[in-house]
Image (cartoon, rainbow, N blue to C red):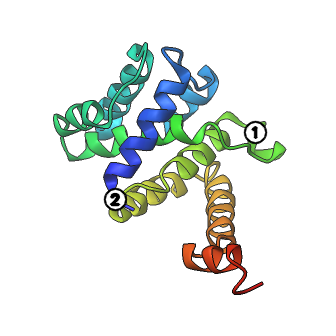
């Protein structure tokens, strides 16, 4: 899955919140604390894109914003979009009770379709925070379990036409 899929899914998530923040303010503030100093400008650019989106925002528009950022800003932008995109994934109660853990959980879930190099950098950044690390580990375990539970398309096809059980 390419970076364009990440932008496409993020655009859909932003369009679903249609102008509202889409992420609880406490979680957004906690997420800001997880973003490295050099990446804050990108994170703010992502949050501004979310807040100003009154209708459909396209992946091309998101990519144009992202391309104008420095390298660290791009990581912050990706983390901001991941926060919004992952905010729809229900977290366990222990994680949901802590805004910083919930921010880490949401970012981890939201970054699944991002570039592998971006995912590694984001996970390393999040896992460096001791309060966020357990939420990141739990989210990664859930993502991996979901990935393992999905049969490849051809197995689903063969099952649908009755060739396999």
Point out the tag, 2 or 1, that comes first from the N-terminus. Answer: 2
Q: Is residue 36 visible?
A: no
Rendering coords of residue 80 (x, y %)? 43, 36
Residue 94, quarter of picture: top right
Residue 27, quarter of picture: top right
Residue 75 falls left or right of residue 93: left
Q: Which element is circle 1 on?
A: helix
Residue 154 position (above or below residue 105)? below
- Count how many numbered circles sit on residues in the image: 2
Rendering coords of residue 133 (x, y %)? 61, 56
Residue highlighted by disc 1? 96
Residue 163 falls left or right of residue 53: right
Residue closer to the observer: 87 or 103: 87
Query: CB under 8 Å between callouts 2 and 1?
Result: no
Packing grade of label 1 (10 A; few <14, some 14-19, many >=20) is some
Rendering coords of residue 68 (x, y %)? 16, 34
Q: Tell me how far mark 2 sits from mark 1, CA to CA.
A: 29 Å
Residue at the outermost bottom position? 164
Rendering coords of residue 31 (x, y %)? 53, 35
Q: Which element is circle 2 on?
A: loop
Q: Quadrant of the C terminus?
A: bottom right
Residue highlighted by disc 2? 2
- Eye-nearest disc, 2 or 1: 2
Residue 39 position (above or below residue 46)? below
């Amino acid at each position: 899955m390419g970076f364009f899929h990440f932008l496409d899914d993020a655009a859909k998530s932003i369009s679903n919140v249609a102008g509202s923040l889409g992420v609880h303010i406490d979680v957004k503030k906690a997420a800001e604390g997880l973003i490295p100093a050099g990446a804050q400008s990108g994170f703010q650019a992502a949050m501004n894109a979310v807040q100003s989106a009154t209708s459909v925002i396209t992946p091309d528009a998101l990519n144009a914003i992202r391309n104008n950022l420095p390298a660290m800003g791009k990581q912050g932008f990706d983390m901001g979009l991941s926060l919004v995109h992952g905010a729809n994934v229900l977290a366990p109660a222990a994680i949901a009770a802590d805004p910083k853990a919930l921010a880490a959980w949401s970012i981890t879930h939201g970054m699944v379709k991002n570039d592998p190099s971006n995912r590694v950098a984001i996970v390393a950044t999040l896992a460096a925070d001791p309060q966020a690390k357990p939420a990141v580990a739990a989210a990664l375990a859930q993502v991996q379990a979901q990935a393992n539970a999905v049969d490849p398309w051809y197995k689903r096809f063969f099952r649908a036409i009755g060739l396999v059980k």
